Amino acid sequence: MTKLAIMQEREEDKWEHHTSLKCWKCDPVEGKEILASVDTVKRLTDGVMQSLSSARQSEVQAWEEEITPCEHTLTLEQYATGNIPAEGLARCASCELTSNLWLCLTCGALDCGRYQYGGTGGNGHALEHFTSTQHPVCVKLGTITPEGGADIYCYACNDARIDPELPTHLATFGINVASQKKSEKSMTELQIEQNLAFDFSLTAEDGSALRPVFGPGLTGLRNLGNSCYMASVLQALFSLTQFQQRYYGGASSGTVSNGVFERAAAHWETCSQSLPADCLECQMLKVADGLLSGRYSKPHVESPPSGGLAHSTPEHTPWQTGLKPAGFKALVGKGHAEFATMRQQDAEEFLGHLLTVLRRFNHQVNSGAPDEAEPTEAFAFGLEQRLQCLSCRRVRYRVDNMDILSFGVPAQELPADTGPKYAPVTLMQCLGVLLGVTGQEELEYQCEGGCGKVSAVRLLQFSTFPDILVLHAKKFQLKNWVPTKLDIPIILPPGDELVLDAFLGQGLQPDEEQLPESSSGPSSSSLPQLNEEALEQLEGMGFPLVRCQKALLATQNQDVESAMEWLFSHMDDPDIDEPIQSKPRDTNMAPEPSSDQIAMLADMGFTHAQARKALIETDGNPERAVEWLFNHPDDTGEIAPSSNTLIQKKPVPGSSRLPARYRLKAFISHKGPSVHSGHYVAHIRLPPTQLGDGMDVEENDEWVLFNDEKVVVADKTSVDELKKLAYMYIFERI
C-alpha cells in the first residue's frame, strides 16, 4: 500500500455469529429460546435487520443526491426476451453470484455489478455487457419497491438515473412491480454505511495507522448529511490568522469566565437578536470557540453497556465525537435555493456565498463604516481586464473585485496502457492559460471607436494581490451532456511557493489611447456585446437563448467552458428564464424602485438615498443593489441630472506591492467521480508545536487531514499525491 487508504473493518473477520430467537417476556433474565428452523430464523432476523427505521429513512433522504432521467432512460428501446428467473433462482450469466445483480432493460441480460465498498461482491459483468452491446440502462434487482422505486444506472452517462416508465419496462420481462419486495441495500444506503457506520482505518505508506490528534485547532465537525463541503471550508477558514483574530482573538490573552471568552461575552451582552440562532456573529463566535479552544477535541469514550439486552462493543479508534454546526448551517443557508437543503453542494460556491453573507452582515452592523478587522477582505483582490481593438489599436481597462480565482485545467489524455489517464500539468501553466500574455484571447467586438464589428484581444492580469489567494481548479468536461470530473494532476511549484510577479497588470500606459465611452441616451439602451461564437456553441448544445446570454454576461464573455459551469450552477434559479432587462444609460430613465425594496436596503444600514440610487442603477435587483453599494460606499445617493456625472468608486482591495509570493496553507479535495456527489476533505498545514505534546512530528510532516470528525496527521507521501488532485488551493502571502 503506497497511498492514503480507507480500509473497511469487517465484523465477519472478527467474530463468529450464532443467531437464535428468545422470548424475554417468558424469561426476563436469560430469555427463553424459541426453537425454529434455520430458514425461519434467518427470514425473521433479516427482516428486522434490513428494515428502515423512521430515523434512518430521514437519514437516507439527507444523503440522497438529486437524480434525474437522461436521454437513454427516456428513449429506451426494449427487445422482449420473456420472463427472467424468479428471485432466489437468478444468478449472473457469467459467474455464480446471486446478489448485486443488474438487469439490462434493453435485452434482459442479467449480470453482476461492480464490487461495492461495504456491500456485496461483484465482478463487473454488467459493465462488460454494456461494453459489448452498448445497452446503457440497467436496474438492480432486490432494490425494486412496490412504489416503483429502484436503483437505476446508465453506463453511457456513468451516473445514477431515474426511469419514469420503470413499471412498464419491467413488465416486459415478467416483473410485476406491485408484488416486489426490497431485499437488498440501495446505493444510497451503502453510501450511508460507508460514511457513517464503519470505522475507518487511515493508513500511511508503510501500512501503519495514522495517529489521531487532539487539541486547540484540531476539532472535527460531524457530518450533518451531505455537509462535508461546509466542514472542509470552515476548517480551512479558521486555520487562517485573519479569522482567528476576528472571532477568537481574545482567547489567548483575554479573560475567561464560566468557559466563555471575553470577545464572545462582550458581543452577547450587546447582541440585538432575541435568539443566538438568528445572529451570524453569535454563530461565528460559537464555531470559532468550538474549533479553536480545544475543549471539544477529545477522544470519544463510549459508555459501558447496561441492561439485559446490552452487548459489549469492540474497540474502536478513538475518534472525536465532533461538533454539529446545525445552527450555523441553517442560518447561513437560510433563503438560499441550494444551501438551505440537505443536498451535496460545491465547496467553492459555498465559500463565495459565506464571504458574501459575512460582508453583508458586518456592513449592516457597522452602519456602512469600513471595518479594518473584517477577515473577508483578506480574500479580495482586483482582476484587471485589458481589451484592445485590433483595428484602431485603442484600449479599454476594467477592474473587477474578486475573492476566488477560477482557472481551467488543460486536459491531455494519455494512452490507456500508460497508467494515469491524463498528463500532469503545472500550476503555473494553468495560470498562464488564463492570465498574462500567454492567456490573451481573441474575440469578436463591437468597437465604440467606429470600427464596427471587429476582432479584439482580451488580456487578464492582477490589478492587486490578496493576502489570502484561493485558486479553484475547474477540472470537468461534458460527456453525453453530463459534466464529468477529470482527475488531472496539477504539479505545484517547489516548496509549494507561488510567485505571481509576472501577472501584475500596469494599467493604462502613456503610449496607449483609450476607447471612447459608449454614447448615452435612450438609443443606447441595449444588451452588452456578447461573444457570438460562444453564444452559438451554447445554443447548439440545447440551452435556451436567454440562459446562454445570462451565462455569457455573468462570466464576462470568457469562454464556453466558464459559461457552461455557470449554467450548471444556476439551472434551478427561479428567474433563470426571465428576459434580460437592458439597462438605460441615463439613470433618470430607470423605473422608480418600490418603497419595500428601499426599506429592505435601509435596514442593512444604508441611507434612503443610497438605497434608492443603488436600485435605480441595478434595474431594481436587490442582490445586485447590495453589491453596487459595497462598491460605492462613498456615494451619498444623490442622482445628478446628467448620466456623465463622475462617481467616486471604492478603492480596489488588495495590494500591488511586489514581490507577490505565496505559500500553500490548505487544500480541499473532492473524492468521487461525479460533480454532483462525493465527499470533501481538507488538508491544512499546521506548525508541529500545535499537534500536541509527545508527537514525534518532523518539520516536513505538518499536514493535518480533516475528514469530518476524524482529524489525523497525514503522511508526507500521501499529501504530495493528494494535493495534485485538489479542488481548491488556499495560499497565504509571505
Image (cartoon, rainbow, N blue to C red):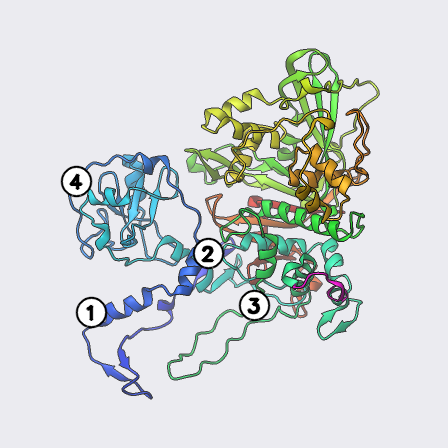
- Which mark is nearer the camera, 1 or 2? 2
Classify mark 1: residues with Cα within 10 Å, few (<14), some (14-19) or many (20+): few
* Closer to the eye: label 4 or 3: 4
> In whole angstroms, how far apart are the C-alphas of marks 2 and 3?
22 Å
Give the numbered dot on residue 85: none
- How far is disc 1 from disc 3 in space, using C-alphas? 41 Å
Which residue is painted at 66% across and 33% down in the image? 619
Q: Of the residues under marks 1 and 4, which one precedes in the sequence?
A: 1
* Residue 44 coordinates in the image, percent (x, y): 25, 70
Amino acid at the residue labelled 1: Asp
Write down the region rendered in magenta.
266-275
**Circle 2 is placed at which residue position?**
62
Q: Earlier in the sequence, mark 1 or mark 2?
A: 1
- Circle 1: element type: helix
Secondary structure type for disc 4: loop
Q: Tag 4: Cα neighbours inside 10 Å, few (<14), some, or many (≥20)? A: few
Q: Is residue 305 left or right of residue 80?
A: right
Q: Quadrant of residue 633?
A: top right
The alpha-carbon separation of the residues under discs 4 and 3 comes to 54 Å
x and y percentages locating residue 243 in the rendered image:
72, 55
Identify the amino acid type marked 2: Ala
Which residue type carries mark 3? Gln
Q: Is residue 291 magenta?
A: no
Q: Residues within 10 Å of mark 3 (few under 14, many from 20)?
A: many
Residue identifier under label 4? 81
Per the image, label 3 sits on a secondary structure element best described as loop
Let me know if residue 536 appears in the view.
yes
Percent of width and height locating residue 215: 65, 67
Do the residues bearing badges 2 and 3 touch, measured as CB atoms within 8 Å?
no
> Residue beneath label 3, please?
320
State how far apart marks 1 and 4 are (Cα): 33 Å
